[in-house]
Image (cartoon, rainbow, N blue to C red):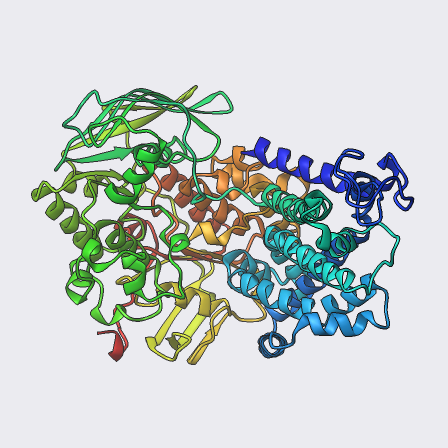
Amino acid sequence: MKIRVLTTLAVSLTLIGVVAFGPILAPASVTETGSVPWDPFTGLLGTDNLGRDVWSRLLAGGVGFLPALPLGIATTLVAAVVALIACQSPRLGAVLAQASASLLAVPSAVVVLSAAVLLPSWAAVGLVMTVLGIPLSARQLHAAAGPLASSGFVEAARLRGESRLLVAVRELAPALSPVVVADMGIRCVAAMHLLVGVHVLGLGPQAPSPDWALMIRDNISGVLLSPVATLAPAIALSFLSLALLAGLDAAAELLRPPEPHAQRGWSDATTTGTDTEASVHLCDVEVRRAGRIVIRVPRFVVRPGEVVGIQGPSGVGKSTLLGVLAGDPAPGLHVSGEISLGGRGLAEAGRRCWRRTSIGLAEQDPGDTIDARLTVRQVIADGRPESATGPIDATLLDRAGLPANLLDRPARLSGGQAARVSMLRALCSDPEVLLLDEPTAGLESGSIAAVTRLVRERAETLSGATVVVSHDEAFLAAVCDRVEHVVPGAEGGTVTDDPAEGEDITDLSLATPTESGLLRVDGLDVATPDGRLLLEDVTFEVAAGEMLAVQGPSGLGKSTLLRTICGLHPMRAGTPTPPSEVIAPEEIGLVAQDAGLALNPFWSIGRQVARAGAGSSSRTGAGSTQPLADLNVAELAGRRPGECSGGQRQRANLARSLAGEPELLLVDEPTAGLDARAARTVLEILAEQARRGRAVVIVTHDPDVASACHRVLHVERFSPSSG
């Protein structure tokens, strides 16, 4: 794909270069008459209305439209600055929305023609782009930047005490850069169209100057005698527009960071129908990236009604295997071997149809795949008619242990709720193959029981095959007919039925906490932004050197409680108090549950960890990425989040918070979706933080994690409206 993007960029730059140097390349005079008017047989493209060489005038006539490039780029750059400021100031954001909406009613053509009477054409267009283009571009960029402004990586920067300017420059601008560059293409084309309109009406270059717009106007009357004299400049204008748009789109694509849920491609694996009864059949399949084996599958068969589990350490390629099973491997992967999907070999068009009609996929980071602007009903429907999904009602939500009143609310969900909504979205159309990636990660026992029941009910009806990737051994034992294990090796992971040795995470060595309270929470009420009460009268204290586990049902507000403590969510009543003489607000570290949203997709993992540790007195230079090594993921330093597995992103997210050496560490589901060995490493690191005299608060549904802490705080109090 990168070759295609680079080729597009090279072709676009070449076309723009030809336009820029066209006057030099013109073989004949662009003003002198060489033959009779509209003679199609003179020269390469004939002559125009005055007998001048059309080919020479075509080469020389595009220079007047090149100002559209700097005008469009400048418009977007100024608009991006306005958008970045507005997304951090609600008042300015409201002003921008109202102003840009009003300007949509202003006819740009009338404004530019009025200005062109007094100004050169490029200046008139520049004025219009300033008055109308900047607000409209800022409106669109502000809409794109809005979700980023509340993302985890921006909140982490604010917790570190970075100013709004630094947050905008270091976090928001890089993450928004692909959108900004793509918008430049739109503004350049808009500026060019305005220039064409001005020139056609004679308010730009005057005859006998070569100009594509003038060529169209002057030769339209002779289109039957010499069509080329009119069509050639029209086609040239179209190609220049495409060059500007495609070139900047290609540049945006080069800036775009890899995404775990990006549009995927397929390679040249052999697709055969060797097992007509199996829903999925893989034989001697190898998945490679840049020549290196990511995962090897000697044989993998899943039949209708069968539930097969896949287990293995984080980062060995389990999610990659799910992509292959869905007929949808990630870009850059080369898949070889024999693959049968739905009992038949499939061509590319067949694979697309297979994914659309026969696959249900619940991905590992469900929050990344759910649009919070939609209702839960719309998220589950996913654009499909009720005839395809069946009724989406309270009964369906109840099967997943979700409250009925969630159905028509905006999809602002807790991590556990998002996981179950994602599963219902994948399950409701009764797909031939259901693929679940860590479906119980971060869920409490009641929700796990609901997910278990859904999987078993599907298996008992023999309606389709199910493949489950999970580190939860108890869940796999409860739902699976068999479990395949991905074993890491020197050349990637290998699927085998030989289980790896487990790890015990409960026998940690903990120091005795001090008697001094590092955090006091007294009578705290927590509510949603719309005023719905989540938690009421929460009171607890955490001492220096203590690990405190917080447990309670999904959707109760435990994650919101952590955000309230560190000041990222407004409190309704009460006081979370880190005593000022003991801990400063910037010495609080928050490890959010959804690592996919918590890390900046633009920057490498190592850069993000190093920046977080820049203010720490004891970590300098190469040591600033030491937390990655402590968590056994030092190899991630040069990768961006989209190039990592879910478990790797989770540990990288923790490493970034540890780099700043916070005195109070708030951790949300640190072991969800991790294998036992990685979970053990994470808990050992957290225990080491406690031994150093730091307070650690862990939100978890894992009883083993809770038992490894000094104390457990059970949060059970729902608001009256939650049921």
Horizontal relation, residue 349 to residue 43: left or right: left
Quarter of the image where the C terminus is located = bottom left
Instruction: Identify the residue at image location x=81%, y=48%.
Output: 63
Is residue 442 among what the camera can see?
yes
- Counting labels gives 0
Q: Position of residue 253 (x, y in %)?
A: 58, 43
Instruction: Identify the residue at image location x=53%, y=36%.
Output: 636
Of 103 and 597, the residue lying toward us: 103
Instruction: Identify the residue at image location x=14%, y=27%.
Output: 277
Indicate the quadrant where residue 128 lies.
bottom right
Q: Position of residue 389 (x, y in %)?
A: 21, 55
Indicate the quadrant where residue 107 lies.
bottom right
Q: Is residue 34 above or below residue 289?
A: below
Is residue 512 among what the camera can see?
no
Q: Position of residue 62 (x, y in %)?
A: 78, 48
Q: Is residue 202 above or below residue 60?
A: below
Horizontal relation, residue 531 to residue 252: left or right: left
Q: Position of residue 462 (x, y in %)?
A: 9, 40
Indicate the quadrant where residue 41 lies.
top right
Of 233 and 367, the residue lying toward us: 233
Instruction: Identify the residue at image location x=61%, y=52%.
Output: 182
